[in-house]
Image: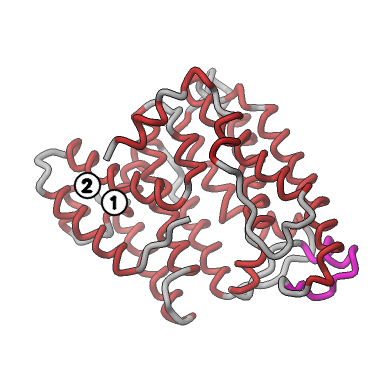
């Protein structure tokens, strides 16, 4: 996964603001912001970039804007060389910019008020898709938790105290973009999104145990660890490898149940969104299975080779992928 410096992000923001302000219309400014957001998605998540290519262009653009708006705060807490006070201050400024953007009616006004370009783009999606504004505030609260992390006693504690803000509400954002199949299906679509948000976040936790521990965080439920005799997880202690492998297998199996729950209501989404959602489930479920079955995952970051990702994607839509990589 590529990682940009804070200076790179700032440079992209300035260049995108200039281009959007000179674009000549609201629609043209939106297109400029989406192109920049697409660069973020391509850089940071090959898997999610691939599966979103199966969305209709208008929905794909909104998803790209959402991704950029959640990626940047994550970089504040994970990557930028900042101390705790500085991270919290950046998050507070970002949250204030979001609240301000919601009071403004056009991208042009937002950018003239010197709001961050990805806040402006996301605020436009919130306004147009009818996303409840408080969902993003819950997401930023989860990012603040990462600055001052704590342990989670059970999986329910983990879901309620952290995953709700870090992933479930992001699924809710996307549900408002994806839309419902038939009138009355939206609540089922939200249920599917909730289950998928939990599954994706748990898979990421399983994959990133070593990186998270290096940041002083442990997202594996303590009762899972203690059931295998691990009082304090040490990612560099190979003597824990066998017990840790059992923790991975157990939690991966639990995660797979959430992928099943998400699939059970996938028909609640608009038909033109279902291919992308199913592709997302299939690709990340494949990663989850690799982690759960691979006893040598301890100490390394598991991934799915590109050729294996292609095996679970809809063959009739392959033509969209080379076009997506050619587009700038």
Residue at numbered disc 2: 107
User: Is label 1 in a helix, a strand or a loop?
Assistant: helix
Which span is picked out in magenta? 221-234
Instruction: Kindly indicate whether the residue at mark 2 contacts the one at mark 1 (C-beta within 8 angstroms).
Output: yes
Quadrant of the rendered structure where residue 151 is? bottom right
Rate crowding at label 2 as few (under 14), some (14 to 19) or many (20 or more) other CA atoms within 10 Å: many
- The vertical placement of 232 against 314, above or below, is below
Q: Position of residue 296 (x, y in %)?
A: 76, 57
Looking at the image, can residue 298 be seen? yes
User: Is label 2 in a helix, a strand or a loop?
Assistant: helix
Looking at the image, can residue 278 be seen? no
In this view of the protein, which residue sits in the foreground, 295 or 78? 295
Quadrant of the rendered structure where residue 11 is? bottom left
Residue at numbered disc 1: 120
Quadrant of the rendered structure where residue 206 is? bottom right
Q: Residue at x 34, y 44 (%)?
A: 38
Rate crowding at label 1 as few (under 14), some (14 to 19) or many (20 or more) other CA atoms within 10 Å: many
In this view of the protein, which residue sits in the foreground, 132 or 319? 319
The CA distance from mark 1 to mark 2 is: 6 Å
Q: Residue at x 51, y 42 (%)?
A: 47
Q: Position of residue 241 (x, y in %)?
A: 81, 65
User: In this rendering, would 281 be left or right of 50?
Assistant: right
In this view of the protein, which residue sits in the foreground, 248 or 113? 248
């Amino acid at each position: 996964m590529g990682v940009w410096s804070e200076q790179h992000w700032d440079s992209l923001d300035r260049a995108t603001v200039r281009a959007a302000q000179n674009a000549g219309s609201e629609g043209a400014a939106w297109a400029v912001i989406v192109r920049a957001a697409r660069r973020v998605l391509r850089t940071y998540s090959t898997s999610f970039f691939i599966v979103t290519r199966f969305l209709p262009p208008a929905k794909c653009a909104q998803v790209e804007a959402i991704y950029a708006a959640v990626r940047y705060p994550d970089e504040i807490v994970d990557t930028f060389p900042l101390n705790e006070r500085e991270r919290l201050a950046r998050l507070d400024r970002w949250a204030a910019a979001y609240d301000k953007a919601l009071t403004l009616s056009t991208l042009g006004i937002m950018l003239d008020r010197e709001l961050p370009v990805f806040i402006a783009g996301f605020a436009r999606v919130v306004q147009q898709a009818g996303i409840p504004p408080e969902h993003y505030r819950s997401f930023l609260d989860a990012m603040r938790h990462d600055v001052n992390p704590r342990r989670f006693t059970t999986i329910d504690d983990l879901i309620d105290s952290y995953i709700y803000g870090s992933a479930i509400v992001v699924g809710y954002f996307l549900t408002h973009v994806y839309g419902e199949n038939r009138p009355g299906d939206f609540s089922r679509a939200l249920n599917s999104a909730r289950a998928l948000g939990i599954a994706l976040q748990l898979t990421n936790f399983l994959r990133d145990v070593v990186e998270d521990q290096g940041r002083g965080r442990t997202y594996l439920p303590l009762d899972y660890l203690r059931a295998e005799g691990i009082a304090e997880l040490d990612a560099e202690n190979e003597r824990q490898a066998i017990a840790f492998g059992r923790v991975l297998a157990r939690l991966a199996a639990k995660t797979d149940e959430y992928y099943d729950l998400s699939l059970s209501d996938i028909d609640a989404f608009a038909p033109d969104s279902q291919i992308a959602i199913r592709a997302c489930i299939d690709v990340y479920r494949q990663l989850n299975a690799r982690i759960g079955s691979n006893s040598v995952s301890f100490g390394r970051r598991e991934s799915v080779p590109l050729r294996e990702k292609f095996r679970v994607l809809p063959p009739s839509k392959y033509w969209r992928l080379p076009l997506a990589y050619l587009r700038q």
